[in-house]
Image (spheres, grey):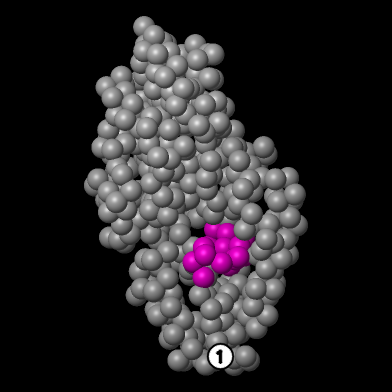
Amino acid sequence: MRTSTSDASKLRALIDAEVHRAGFDAVAVTTPDAIPLAPARLAEFVADGFHGSMQWIAETLERRSEPMALWPQVRSIIVLAMNYGPDHDPRSILAKRDRGAISVYARNRDYHDVMKGRLKEIAGKIVARAGGDVKVFVDTAPVMEKPLAEAAGLGWQGKHTNLVSREHGSWLFLGTIFTTAELAPDRAEIDHCGSCRACLDACPTDAFPAPYRLDARRCISYLTIENKGPIPHEFREKIGNRIYGCDDCLAACPWNKFAQAASEAKLAARDDLREPALADLLVLDDPAFRTFFSGSPIKRIGRDRFIRNALIAAGNSGDAGLAGIVCTLLDDTSPLVRGAAIWALARLVPDTEYSERAVAGLKTESDETVRDEWRLALSKPNPIGTHA
């Protein structure tokens, strides 16, 4: 849809005003052909297997890498950002081993819910003013938001592969509005990482094989959220008390010194999710889990995966007081939970007690994956020396 220079200018002024009225912190415009290097980089990511079990990335490769493959009518892409910066260093909880560390973005309402309705309102006003058509996306469609945000000038993709802003650091949610209106694009941002490698060095599991490359299979966010099976043994100790996601690479970015805490009330952390006690989380059954995490993105992974994560944290806590709760989960209906409970128990009770439980468990357990957990813990000494 052709738009005159005057009309395009007025439309952009409308967009800027509506974006800030809706609570977004930044907006910029780019064109659908502005990320020519993205397709090859994405294809390499998939070819190397770095996407892990996220098959939806491979299945949507063509549409994800080319905006016009997703929607041929698009002429301009409006990229919007909302700051979710924390009011403190989120890594401080890592020293409190009896508490669960939840990624900053998940400590309140699901950002998809917060942003999408507002994006639709803005999109509706664009159509009312300029006609044509629009489509709205918030991380739920095959759209490469971060390269588009860089092309639009909102920031650059740092060495941790996330968007970095000179105003907001590494703490930005992104959404896009595809429109048939032709708008003047903003100038792309350049990379300001320089020789810094703080984010790479901060990763507990060495998930970055090289700067600007992420192997999701080693990333704690992937392991605790996307991964549906048992967490591989090689990463369990390194996960520490991180029970949903990981903020280490984001929090290490020096550009965060310019960031302000999120002003959007719906993005501020719930008090009960800032430093939740593992003892309180481990007792959640499915109805209690759904109620406690109502409206939270955590609800999407389901109770069993979440309890799996909390059990890994319990095993790393060194808190023998959690052993009683862990024992109750040895009989859980989920093999995923039972297996994690075995690993945690082996690190919290004396060898003699564990051996007795293992012998009994092997007699009744039918799931071979869970049986392997009993056997493996029997064959190795306790790694943190808490056994009598």
The picture places residue 72, in percent across and down from the top left corner, at: 68, 80
What quarter of the picture does the N terminus occupy? bottom right
- The amino acid at mark 1 is Gly
Which residue: 70% across, 45% down?
49
Which residue: 66% across, 63% down?
60
Q: Is residue 87 left or right of residue 58?
A: left
Q: Is residue 196 left or right of residue 166?
A: right
Q: Is residue 325 left or right of residue 110?
A: left
Q: Nearer the viewer, residue 359 or 195?
A: 359
Q: Is residue 312 visible?
A: no
Residue at which label 1 appears: 132
Q: Which residue is farthest front?
A: 363
Which residue: 29% across, 51% down?
287
Vertical order, 76 against 207 (above or below): below
Highlighted magenta segment, given as a residue range = 137-155
Q: Is residue 66 left or right of residue 287?
A: right
What quarter of the picture does the C terminus occupy? top left
Q: Nearer the viewer, residue 371 or 222?
A: 371
Label 1 Cα crowd, 10 Å radius (few <14 / some 14-19 / many 20+): some
